[in-house]
Structure formats: structure tokens, C-alpha cells
Image (cartoon, grey):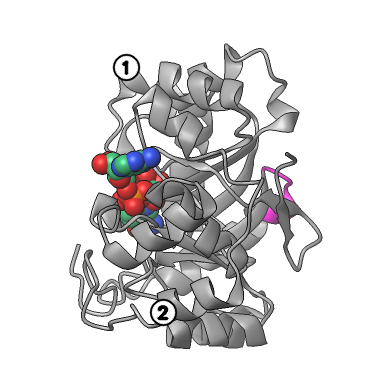
Amino acid sequence: AQQSVITFHDGNTIPQVGLGVWRTPADIAAPTVRTAIAAGYRHVDTAAIYENEDGVGEGIKSSGVPRSDIFLTTKLWNDNQGYDATLTAFDKSLKRLGTDYVDLYLIHWPAPTRNRYVDTWKAFIQLKKDGRARSIGVSNFYPEHIDRLVAETGVVPVINQIELHPDFQQKASQAAHKKLDIATQSWSPLGQGKLIDHPVIGGIAKKHGKTPAQTIIRWHMDSGLVVIPKSITPSRIEENFQVFDFALDDDDMAAIAKLDDIGARMGPDPKTATF
Ligand code: NAD
């Protein structure tokens, strides 16, 4: 079945399912990315802080699929926020990735105590103008952080990549994004694996003859989200992409809606994180 895409407000499109490569060692990143591309993935999500951009770039180059067919995301680390520091960090990311553009560049965290995300965003706007970042977005931003970017620059991010899984659904952020035509992207979409054994997920999976991971990924898709499950295991990488031949029904969606629990955040709260 065909990969589905989400269209950004800048006109570019992103494949709805991508491969996440957090905690994927650099030397494993290349074969992992090659496995994913062979399985049909055309979207890879990395970050400078993952220290595997070189492996990701090598994996894309050696995949046999043209660079122009791959949607590549990387992220600016917090230490490099600020106008000039952003431009320098971006150059270094491109060099490590072995490419002359990224499809999407994200501010990794708002890091509000640093108070530099607006200047950082101004550099992102320049990178977009230069065509070296085809689209620009943010990650881990609360609606109030996005509102400040828009108020001070007039430029709306195309996407916000946030922690989001069936027991942490981020309804308030999703609603705020919708108002501004910002796509929502789910990180730790499988709850880092903790939701695989959930009985509600298991029941729905059984009904459709799919695995729990496929069921959760399909829930993100049917919720209109962009989703980037992570695995370094070839069979799981393949499994996580076999999600285009079924859909959840209203009963399934209603059952998963009930799992939402605002206390289920796994990562740091972006408002109070001090890194
Ligand atoms: P995830 O929710 O994708 O879970 C990954 C884990 O789930 C694997 O390590 C494995 O243990 C398990 N798993 C994967 N496929 C499985 C399968 N088919 N069957 C059984 N178990 C399976 O977790 P993640 O890596 O935290 O998040 C995905 C991606 O999101 C990351 O790789 C990264 O690209 C991105 N991310 C971004 C941020 C951010 O701050 N922007 C933070 C965390 C993650």
C-alpha cells in the first residue's frame, strides 16, 4: 500500500510514517536507515544531539534511493540557540549528514530559561529563505512558545514534534496547532515500548489481525498525526511500516481515547526543563 503524506502550510509534504533514530549508535544508524528505506520508509528523524547524523547520511547515500525521494529531519540542540550559533550548527549538521539541504529543521526544545528561541527562529527563517531548510518547525513547544514566535516574527512553524502516545494524547496542544494549521508529530509514539502490552491495544490489534505496535502507529495516523516509531531491529522496522492496509474504526478510536492520562508524560516537561 502507498505511504500517506501530510501537507504543511508552506505547501511541502511529509510522509506520515518515518523512522526515529534516537539512541541509535552512529555505526548502527547506517544499516538501520538502509533497512528502513528497503522496507519502504522515505522519512528519517534525527537530531544533532543523537550523534548519528553521519551514519544517517551514509545510510541514505548507500540506500540506492535518490536523496530527493527521502524526507530528512534534523534538530538544533539547545546549546546552539541564538542567531549566529544556529547558522553555524546548521552548517555542521549538513556536513555530517553529507547533504546540501534538509527537508525539515526543528528547534529541539524551547529551553525557555535560555530565552533565545525567538532569535533562533529568525535564523531558521533565513535558512528557509536560502532553501537549505525546505521547511522549518519546532519541537517540545507549548502553545504559548509558538504564540511568541508568531507574534515576534509573523512566521508560523509548519510542525511541532511533541511527546504523544495513547496514554498521553496532548489534546490541548493538538487543538492549538489545528488553529494555526501546524502539523502535530508524535515522539515516543509507542510510549518507548510500554504500551505494547496494554490490554486495550492488544484487543484492538487482535480484532484487525495486526500487532500492538502496528495498532498504535495506525492510531497516530488515524488521528492525523505524523509518527516516527524507533527500532533498530530489522523485523520490527518492517513490522512498523506494515500499517497501510487497515484502519481503526470509531469503536477502536473511542476505546483508545479513554486511555488519555495527563500524568503519563515520560520525558521532561519543556516548560521547566533546564538543559
Ligand atoms: P518509541 O515510542 O518509538 O519506542 C521505541 C521502542 O519501542 C523501541 O526501542 C523498542 O523497545 C520498542 N519497539 C519498537 N517497535 C516495536 C515493535 N514492533 N514491537 C515491540 N516493541 C517495539 O520511542 P522513541 O525512540 O523515544 O521515539 C521515537 C522517535 O521520536 C525517536 O527515535 C526520535 O526520533 C524522536 N524523539 C524526539 C524527541 C524530541 O525531543 N523531539 C524525544 C524523544 C524521541
Check disc 2 and give the amino acid type: Gln
Residue 260 visible here: yes
Quadrant of res 181: bottom right
Q: Nearer the viewer, residue 157 or 78?
A: 157
Q: What stretch is highlighted in magenta?
A: 128-132
| Mark 2 and mark 1 residues within 8 Å of each other at the beta carbon | no
| Residue 91, x across and y down, in percent | 51, 37
Q: How far apart are marks 2 and 1 (CA)?
A: 34 Å
Give the residue at mark 2: 170
| Residue 196, x across and y down, in percent | 30, 52
Check disc 1 and give the amino acid type: Asp
| Residue 49, x across and y down, in percent | 31, 43
Crowd class of label 1 (few under 14; some 14 to 19; many from 20; radius 10 Å): some
Q: Mark 1 falls on what kind of element?
A: helix
- When the figure is inspected, residue 265 is found, relative to residue 93, above or below; the finding is below
Quadrant of res 152: bottom right
Tag on residue 27? 1
Magenta stretch, main secondary structure, is loop
